[in-house]
Amino acid sequence: MTFVFDFGFEKPGVSWDDASLGLFFAGFGEETDFGKTPGPLAVADASRYVELFEMQVGLAPLEIGTYAEIVGTADPIDAAARRAAEANKNGIFPIIVGEDRRITEQFSGLPLVAFWGKVGRSEANELEVFRGQPTMLAGVRAATSKAFKAIPGNVAIATSRALGANREMFRAMLSQLKKPVYLSIDLDVLAPSVAQTARSIEPGGLSWYELMDAIEMVFDGPGVAAADLVGLGKVAPRSPAAFLGAQILIRIAGLLAIKLSK
Amino acid sequence: MTSNPTHLGIIALPFEVSTSFLKGTKEAPLAILEELEKIDNFDFALGRDPFQNLRRRVVQPHDSDLVDPHLQQSLAIRTAKELLTSGGFPLSLGGEHTVSIGPIRIARTIGPLGVVQLDAHADLRDEYQSDPLSHACVMRRVTEMDCSLLGVGIRTMCEEEAQFVEERGLKQVDGFKAATSTDWYHLIDDLPERIYLTIDMDVFDPAEVPAVGTPEPGGPSYEAVSDFLQHLFKVKDVVAADIVELRPEKDSQASIRLAARLIGLIAGLRFRK
C-alpha cells in the first residue's frame, strides 16, 4: 500500500511527471533493532510545520516540484528503495527516508558518501554492497571491532572529529570522487544533543552547521545523484528529532534547487 | 507603589492559543518561577547577585482568568503601564509569543521604541492559519506600531516573510552569525534609545534548549546571548522585556533553568549598582 501526500507546510506536491524531487518514506512501522517505530512518518508529519524559505540561499526549495509518497509494504525500506531507483531513472532526484541502515543495491553503481555516526554489522554490510565504488565514510565515531575490520579497503574515513576540525581535508577527499554520489545521512552522525533520539547516544558527533557545511561541499564537489535519510528509529511523532529530520530534507531540497537553477 | 516602587515586575502570562507543532507553553511561567526559587543567585557574568537589594514582585492572573486570553492581555497591559510609568521594569513570561504585543504597544505609547527580537523565526506573517494574532505573526503586528525592529538568530521563514523583510528593509542577524560572531552588534546603533527586548526561547540552539514548540537546528548558545545582552544593556535603555515560548516537559529541566537564569541576567543588567 502506498499513498501520495503533500510534503511541507501549505505546499501542494506535484505529480510524478512534473517532479524534480521525489521523497520516498518507508512507512507503517518498519521493524528495526529497536522495535517497531514510526520515525519516517513522524518526519513527514513534522514537515508541515517547517518554514519553507531557505534564508542562506534566498529561495524556496520545494518550488522545484516535490513528489512525496509513503511506501508501506511488508518490507517498506526495500520497496522505498525500488521506488527511488525508478524515480532516478525518470530524472527525479530521489531521497529515501527510512529507519534502518539498509539502503539499496539499486544505487551500488554510484560512489557513496555516507555520513554515519557508527559502523556496526548492518553498516559494514552496506559498505560491502558499494565495494566496487569509491566510498567515503564521514563523521564516524564508533564501531564494533568486528565491523571495523570488515570495512572494505576502498573506504576512505573522515572521523567526526577530523571532519569538524578540518573541512579542507574533507574537501580534498571529495575531490577524489569523479562523479555524482549516493549521499547517505544517518541521524546518528549528529551529536546526541543535536539529534535527540534514544538511538543517537554516542558522545561527540557533528554540530548542525558542520553537517550542513559538509553536505554542501558534497553538492558543490562531486555532486549528488540520490540520497537517503535514515536512523529514524526511535524518532517519536511530534518530537524535536522529527522536526530536525524534516529540516534536513528541506535543506537537501535547497541544495538541489541551487544546482537546478545554475 | 510610588513611595517604594517595584524595580522588577514579573508578569506571568500562561497564554496559549495558536502554538502549532508542539504545545505546552502555558506551563512555562509557573515552571520558570519555581525554578527561579531554586537557583544559586550569584551570576558570574555580572559578578554579583542580581536580586540583592532589588524590589521585585510577581503578578499572575487569577485562576478564573487563566483560560481567557483577553483578561491575560489586559493584565499584561495594565501592569506594564503601571511599571513603565513608575520607573519599574516589566518582564513578561509567556506563554506563546503573542503576549509581547500588549507590553510593546504600551511601551511605544510612551516614546520611540526599538524592538530587539531574539528568535529562530521571523514571526512576520500577516496571518497564520487565518489568525493575524498568531504567534507566527507577532512581529508583523509590531512593525505596524511604528517600532524599529532588529531580529537576531533568525534562521527560518516563509517566502512571504522574506519578501516583507526585503520590502521594508528590516535588519536581521541569522542564526549562524548570532552564534559565532559579534561583528553585527553595531546594528543596534541604528535603533532608538529605548528598547523592548523579546526573547523567544527557540532562538537558542535546540541542543541547549530543546523544550520549545518548534526547535530549529543551529542558533546561538546561552553564552553568546549573554554576551550580546551585556552589550545591548550597556549601549541602550532597555525598558521592558519578555521571555516566551518555553515548553516545559519532563526531562527539560536544563531549558527551564536557562530561562530562569535569563531573568537574573536581565535584572542584573537593568539594575546595575
Image: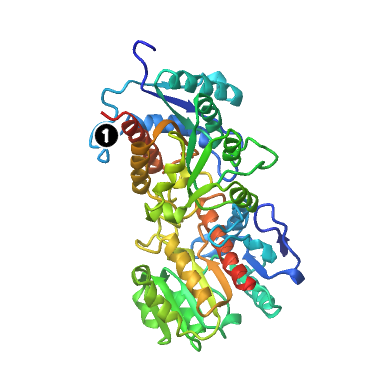
| Residue B31 picture location, percent across and down | 42, 32
How did the renderer colour the structure? rainbow
In the rendered view, tell whether residue A75 sits above or below residue A125: above
Label total for image: 1
Q: Quadrant of residue A260?
A: bottom right
Q: Chain of mark 1?
A: B
Q: Residue furthest left?
A: B47
Label 1: element kind: loop
Horizontally, is B114 left or right of B19 in the view?
A: left
In the rendered view, tell whether residue B75 sits above or below residue A8: above
For the residue pair A233 and B40, the one nearer the viewer reads as B40
Q: Which residue is mark 1?
A: B40
For the residue pair A44 and A82, the one nearer the viewer reads as A44
**Dividing the image into 4 quarters, which one contains the C terminus of chain B?**
top left
For the residue pair A215 and B168, the one nearer the viewer reads as B168
Horizontally, is A80 left or right of A217 in the view?
A: right
Q: Amino acid at mark 1?
A: Asp
**Dividing the image into 4 quarters, which one contains the N terminus of chain B?**
top left
In the rendered view, tell whether residue B70 sits above or below residue B47: above
User: Residue at point 62% right, 57% down?
Assistant: A44
| Residue A225 picture location, percent across and down | 59, 78
Residue B51, can we see it?
yes
